[in-house]
Image (cartoon, rainbow, N blue to C red):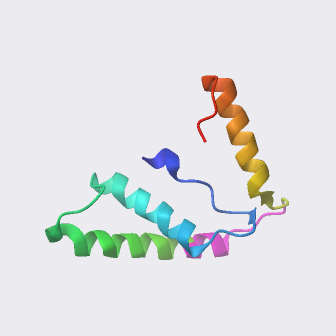
Amino acid sequence: MCRSIKTLFNFEPPATELEIRDASLQFVRKLSGFSVPSKANEAAFDAAVEEVAASARRLIAGLVTHAEPKNREAEVVKARERSTQRFGTDTK
């Protein structure tokens, strides 16, 4: 599950709210063991996603780097090349 959480810092264009929320959702899913919580756990699960997303936003806003921002499209191409080398096929 957590393999699908992507680096969100230092990209051009910057991470969107949707990307931050999706990463937070994946993190909470991994911690809880639920891909979809039961009705009894839904409020706690949703609150945790929002708290993680808020923390992620603060983290990204507070980080500093002197490196040039990475290009999203170029990083996707590199990831596909690594996948092809590792598995012999493009996993898209």
Q: In this view, does 89 lie to the left or right of 31?
A: right
Magenta span: predominant SS is helix
Q: Is residue 92 left or right of residue 66?
A: left
Q: Position of residue 36 (x, y in %)?
A: 27, 60
Please determine whether, in this image, residue 76 is positioned above or below residue 91. Answer: below
The image quarter in which residue 78 lies: top right
Q: Position of residue 23 (x, y in %)?
A: 50, 61
The image quarter in which residue 82 lies: top right
Q: Where is residue 62 in the image (x, y as percent from the top left)?
A: 66, 74
Please determine whether, in this image, residue 80 is positioned above or below residue 86. Answer: below
Q: Residue at x 23, y 62 (%)?
A: 37
Q: Residue at x 62, y 55 (%)?
A: 7
Q: Residue at x 62, y 72 (%)?
A: 16
The residue furthest left is 40
Q: In which quarter of the image is the C terminus?
A: top right
Please determine whether, in this image, residue 50 is positioned above or below residue 5. Answer: below
Q: What stretch is highlighted in magenta?
A: 57-66
Please determine whether, in this image, residue 88 is positioned above or below residue 83. Answer: above
Question: Is 60 part of what is drawn in magenta?
Answer: yes
Q: Which of 65 and 6 is in front in this view?
A: 6
Q: Which residue is drawn at 64% across and 33% down?
A: 90
